[in-house]
Image (spheres, rainbow, N blue to C red):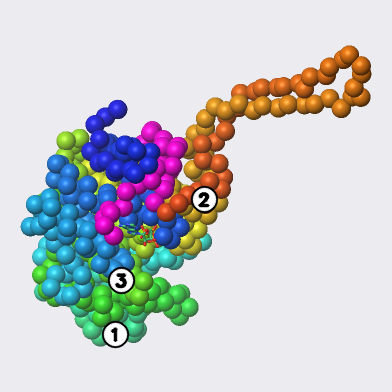
Amino acid sequence: MTKALIELECFEPAGTKLEFSREDLLGHSLALGGSGSGKTSRFVLPMVRELIHSPERIGLIILDTKADGQMSAAVRRAAIEAGREKDLIVIDGSGERTLDIFGDCANFGIDGVDTLTSLLGSLIPRDSKNLYWEQTFEALLRQALRLMVLQERPQLDYSALIGQLIRYLLLHRLQEPYYKEQVERLKTQRAHQPPPIQCIYDEVTATHRMWDTLDVRTRSNLQSMTASLTGPLNSPLAHAYFSGGESCSVADKTDRGQILLISIDGIRHAKVARLVACVAKGRFYEAVLRRERDVARPLAGLVLDDWPTAITGGWGNLYSDIEALAMIRSRGGFLVTSAQSLSAIDSIVGVADRRAALANFANLIFFRGRDPEVDLIASNYLGDYKDRLIDTSHHELPKKMGIVTYPVRHEREIRVPAVPIGALARLATGEAYALVGAQAYPQALCLIPHNPVY
Ligand SMILES: Nc1ncnc2c1ncn2[C@@H]1O[C@H](COP(=O)(O)OP(=O)(O)OP(=O)(O)O)[C@@H](O)[C@H]1O
Ligand SMILES: [Mg+2]
């Protein structure tokens, strides 16, 4: 077996460790289990501690969408113990530090627009029956942002971004002089551009014309899609995470091997937490995918205690978990996450997308839970063991003098599932079965919580 990079110790069976090699870690890890089954205290937090202590300096983006103090205390403590306090950067909505939604605001141009469009597009609720609307909306969003950056002296900050989305997409007034003037200016600028850029100018102008001439019903559909974005983007809490303060780039922290902790209360502010988490996650995927393929490159990990908060489905979008998780492993990127049930994920991205995203996880940790599909997965993948089936039959014939009728004993070798359906529901808090790469742990492990003096 390859050398373990991460070892999570267990109370039971004594001396057992849940081990992850570098390769295993790159297979992505998901803990599944009901509320209070031990996912955070027995898996995610010990994993974070180990990742921070790892001799290989791992760049970490940690999304704490509970913001109850547990994750931040664990991260701070581990960073101090590992002598990495200087590597730790915290964004918690206090305004001191904020996330750079533009990726790199100073160099935000046409390429940046494409990236930001896909990133914002990944936040729109997905449905396979809605593909036409999603794609039209993304095209419109792209042109709205292009119109903004192609101006001679574009104002590029968070407020300007929201202003453009609200004014151009949400409130769109036909023939608005402000935009008519901007589009006219583009026509003059176009003449001084190389041909590929001229095409972009043409597209912006054509889309502007189309947007003006759409029928009212089509336009109002697209406007309501805009509202689902601008609502969370324009909330005071979102401003506290994206504007003002010292702007931090997720890509920069990932590349430098630092630890970026982003805390936001996803229970009280679910939509803004999803927005913040998806932006940070998207920027992480992008940073990892920009790297060269190199087996020796330092690892970069994303820790997301509650996967449903930031799960993204869909195809043809780099920020979809289906696509990104399949690609980041070859560039040294990995995800550690948890979820209470698969049904919760289904209600966000649909069954097909959830199944596709789930197929990217080589490591599954099964805590106590009553999700029938998780039962099936555990039962199928954790294998079986040999057992003996003994069958004894007694004769019911009337006893005859001098004749003894012995019971007949049949013995058969059978295979029984190591984790039969229903076994997960009977686990105690902190107990789990696990599958790490090709290694199955078919006997329940009792994992040690991150802080035994709780
Ligand atoms: N260090 C610890 N020592 C002992 N028990 C703990 C410790 N930390 C948490 N617990 C308890 O363990 C149980 C599991 O908590 P945990 O937060 O890990 O569950 P969870 O699976 O993450 O739940 P949720 O899905 O609601 O986040 C809870 O009852 C909690 O009070
Ligand atoms: Mg938890």
Comparing 437 with 333, the one in front is 437
Q: Which residue is mark 3?
A: 265
In this picture, residue 145 sits left or right of residue 413: left
Q: Which mark is residue 286?
A: none
In this picture, residue 380 sits left or right of residue 290: right
Q: Chief secondary structure of the magenta span? A: strand
Q: Which residue is mark 2?
A: 426
Instruction: Identify the image quadrant of the N terminus.
Output: top left
Residue type pointed to by label 1: Glu
For label 3, the SS is: loop
Which quadrant of the frame does ligand 2 lie within? bottom left
For label 2, the SS is: helix
Q: Position of residue 68 (x, y in %)?
A: 29, 68
Is residue 214 placed above or below 117 in the rendered structure? below
First in residue order: circle 2 vs circle 1: 1
The label nearer to you, 2 versus 3, is: 2
Q: Is residue 358 magenta?
A: no
